[in-house]
Image (cartoon, rainbow, N blue to C red):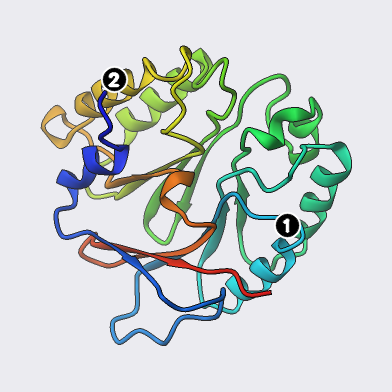
Amino acid sequence: MSNTTIADVFRVNNPTSQVETSPASGVASPEPKENPATLSLGLAANVSIDTLPAILQNLQSADIDAIILFGNITQTGSVDELRQVKVMLDNVRIPTYFIPGTNDLQSSVVSSIFGFRPNSQMYQEVDLAGFRLLLLDNADPTVGIAPEQWAWLAAALAETKKETPTFLFLHTRTQTTPAIEPQNGELERLFALASPAGGSASPSAVFDASMVDQVAILDVFEDNRWSLTNLEIRN
């Protein structure tokens, strides 16, 4: 694949989508919306573990349904850092999901701390407010998406109903390692097979850490239009 991002590939499925960048400084609560979103998600990626408590606190006050962390929440992936993050997430009062990043994979105990499948990269399906969220860890530069994950993703897309908007969340689509780069075309092919013409629903949008400038709010509306607003971190 060329420099086209996965967002560009799937924007055709949601032509009225728009990405907005907020000039505001801080993870402050957004202004009340005239047309409230059907689903609102707080997204965070590549943030400092020192700023994570403030980020989580501000996102919880932003009237959202859930939080998704795209990884690289720790600096070294040490056991101590990972356990600190786990304690923070356990204290969040809304559903919070963690997709490991490259930094977070430095410790072999990340799976046991966060309850992922032993000796396996994580994948998870979440049904929330009538939407289907698929979470996939592909941060390991030597593996990318493992065979077990491919099988799960293909099955999940095959089971998706046309009327159920589906969103895929990955850690990365920008790594160009020999293991990951060839998988871009395979992902595109898999999603093409899962298009509505093939009898099931393709993802309404696909998001990775490169689309999130540290912290963002993703709003999805009743007509499947979505808006991504990046926010700066305020200590």
Image disc number at residue 133: none
Report how far apart the C-alphas of labels 2 and 1 lie in the structure. 34 Å
**Residue in view at x 52 percent, y 81 percent:** 29
Residue 188: where, in percent of width, then height?
A: 26, 26
In this view, the residue farthest toward the left is 197
- Say what secondary structure mark 1 lies in: helix
Residue 9 quadrant: top left
Q: Is residue 150 something one can see in this rendering?
A: yes
In this view, 22 is above or below 182: below
In this rendering, position of residue 171 left or right of residue 100: left
Say what amino acid the circle numbered 1 marks: Leu
What residue did someone put label 1 on? 89
- Say what secondary structure mark 2 lies in: helix
Residue 228: where, in percent of width, then height?
A: 36, 62
In this view, 150 is above or below 137: above
What residue did someone put label 2 on? 185
Residue 51: where, in percent of width, then height?
A: 71, 64
In this view, 19 is above or below 112: below
**Residue in view at x 46 percent, y 54 percent:** 212
